[in-house]
Amino acid sequence: PPENLESTSKGRPLHRAQEEHRRCGTTAANTHMTRLRILCFHSFRLSGDNMRKQLFDLANLGASLADLATLDFVDGGHRLGDDALPERLQALFPPPYFEWWNAREGAGGTAIYDHLEASLAKVERHIAEHGPYDGYLGFSQGGCVAHTLSLLSMRDPSFASRVPAPRFAILLSCRLSRHTEHSELVAGAAAAPLPLPSLVLYGGKDTDVPPAMTRELMATLDPAGVREIYLPLGGHRVPNLGEEEVAVLRRFLKSVQ
């Protein structure tokens, strides 16, 4: 299912200011700005280390925000074998591999997300140990994780008492949770959208999470706070951004500083 096409890491904070400043040519003036702290969630069957590679080495998104934010990566709650990826991809994205859940079909178009509770518990521990964070960033399954965590923290009092809601989210090529136990919360957010400033990036040629699925997720967010980067030729990957898209990203982050 598409929600399984969404990645993982070592669960440790990333404090590489010097490296990130070098990579994006940060000026001395910029180093005095307060940098946001963002917790990042990888896609299906990857890792936090591999997501760092996607953001900084295979795309320019990481470098485009590195002087404005410090990124921290956490792995999914379920570890897989070292052969979880096709052999042709293992050289590019080496193990270990993790997933946030594995979806199986439930009743009435919903799904059951195996391993979800372990992943939520792991994120809760990570935030308690390494937080607080200003916002979330997630790609594919990781974007669904970021949205779901926000939904739970903003609409589930029990969860909110343990995990504070983020002030913003950056969501890449992701969809709504179909987990059976989230059905009422998702329906509630569609009726009364979340007041969560969000930047949503997605591609018109994405066949894993088609644009309509991402737009359905966007409908659960208060439109007054949503900024959108739509790439008509974009597929299911962390995108390289053009100058205009980089400007949108940076304006969004400065608006939530």
Image (cartoon, rainbow, N blue to C red):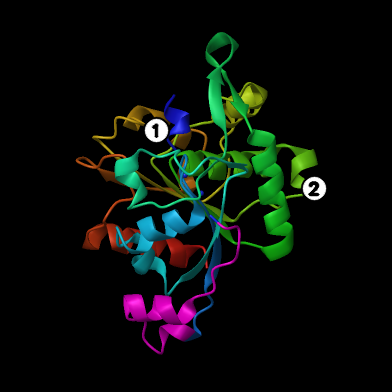
Q: Residues within 10 Å of mark 1 (few under 14, many from 20)?
A: some
Q: Residue furthest top?
A: 108
Q: Residue at x 80, y 47 (%)?
A: 161
Residue 250: percent from the left, percent from the top?
38, 65
Sequence-earlier tag: 1 or 2: 2
What residue is pinned by disc 2? 161
In the image, residue 244 above or below residue 89: below
Quadrant in which residue 61 is drawn:
bottom left
Quadrant in which residue 249 is drawn:
bottom left
Q: Residue at x 58, y 40 (%)?
A: 194
Q: Residue furthest left?
A: 233
Q: Amino acid at mark 1?
A: Arg
Look at the image and tell me whether residue 131 can be seen.
no
Task: Please state, as top left, top right, bottom left or bottom right, where the N terminus lies in the image.
Answer: top left
Look at the image and tell me whether residue 72 can be seen.
yes
What residue is pinned by disc 1? 215
Start and end of the magenta stretch? 10-31
Residue 148: percent from the left, percent from the top?
59, 38
Circle 1: element type = helix
Task: For marks 1 and 2, give the CA distance.
Answer: 29 Å
Q: Is residue 29 magenta?
A: yes
Q: Residues within 10 Å of mark 2 (few under 14, many from 20)?
A: few
Circle 2: element type = loop
Does residue 232 appear to the left or right of 79 in the view shown? Answer: left
Residue 58: percent from the left, percent from the top?
30, 58
Quadrant in which residue 160 is drawn:
top right
Q: Residue at x 33, y 30 (%)?
A: 210
In the image, residue 206 above or below residue 104: below
Q: Is residue 38 magenta?
A: no
Q: Total label count?
A: 2
In the image, residue 171 above or below residue 69: above
Does residue 111 appear to the left or right of 229 in the view shown? Answer: right
